[in-house]
Image (tube, rainbow, N blue to C red):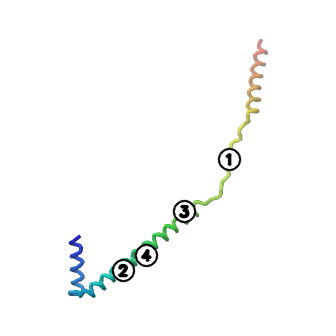
Amino acid sequence: MEAVRSGIEYRLRWLCGRPSPLKRFIAILVIGGMLTVANIDLVVSSIYNIGRKDAETEFMELRHIETLKLQQQKDSLDFLRLKMEKLHNKNRKKYEYE
């Protein structure tokens, strides 16, 4: 951390010569203002992109409801009728052979 601070201080002295306290204060205000503007721009654009991406996914997922193709099931009466017919045919064949 100390190396970073001394590097920044060296570059500021190189750019401004030996800066007076007023020049240093102005340089700090300018750099701070630029970083603040960049930060606000980053936050606002991120919030905007989040809202835009949510809206895109909502519209992309919308589609018409398709009807389901269900197989027609036989009710219990049909099942019983078929079972009775099989049983009747079986008994009839049994009595025919006797």
Tell me the residue that label 3 is attached to. 57
Q: Amino acid at mark 4?
A: Asp
The location of residue 85, given as percent across then percent down, is 77, 26
What's the distance in space between the residues labelled 3 and 4, CA to CA? 24 Å
Of circles 1 and 3, the one toward us is 3
Secondary structure of the residue carrying tag 1 is: loop
User: From mark 1 to mark 2, how far is it between C-alphas?
Assistant: 63 Å
Q: Is label 2 in contact with label 3 (beta carbons under 8 Å)?
A: no
Residue toward you, 87 or 65: 65
Between 47 and 62, the residue placed more toward the observer is: 47
Could you tell me if the residues under marks 1 and 2 are in contact, i.e. CB atoms within 8 Å? Answer: no
3 or 4: mark nearer the eye: 4
Residue that mark 4 sits on:
41
Which of the two discs, 2 and 3, labels the residue nearer the N terminus?
A: 2
N-terminal-most mark, 1 or 2: 2
11 in relation to 89, above or below: below
Residue hosting label 2: 34
- Residue 68: x and y in percent read 67, 49
Q: Disc 2 residue type?
A: Met
Splitting the image into 4 quarters, where does residue 34 fall? bottom left
Give the mark nearer the N terminus: 1 vs 3.
3
Quadrant occupied by the N terminus? bottom left
The residue labelled by disc 1 is: 69
Q: How many labels sit on residues?
A: 4
Residue occupying image coordinates x 34% and y 79% = 32
Q: CA distance from mark 4 to mark 2?
A: 11 Å
Q: Which mark is residue 89?
A: none
Disc 2 packing (10 Å; few <14; some 14–19; many ≥20): few
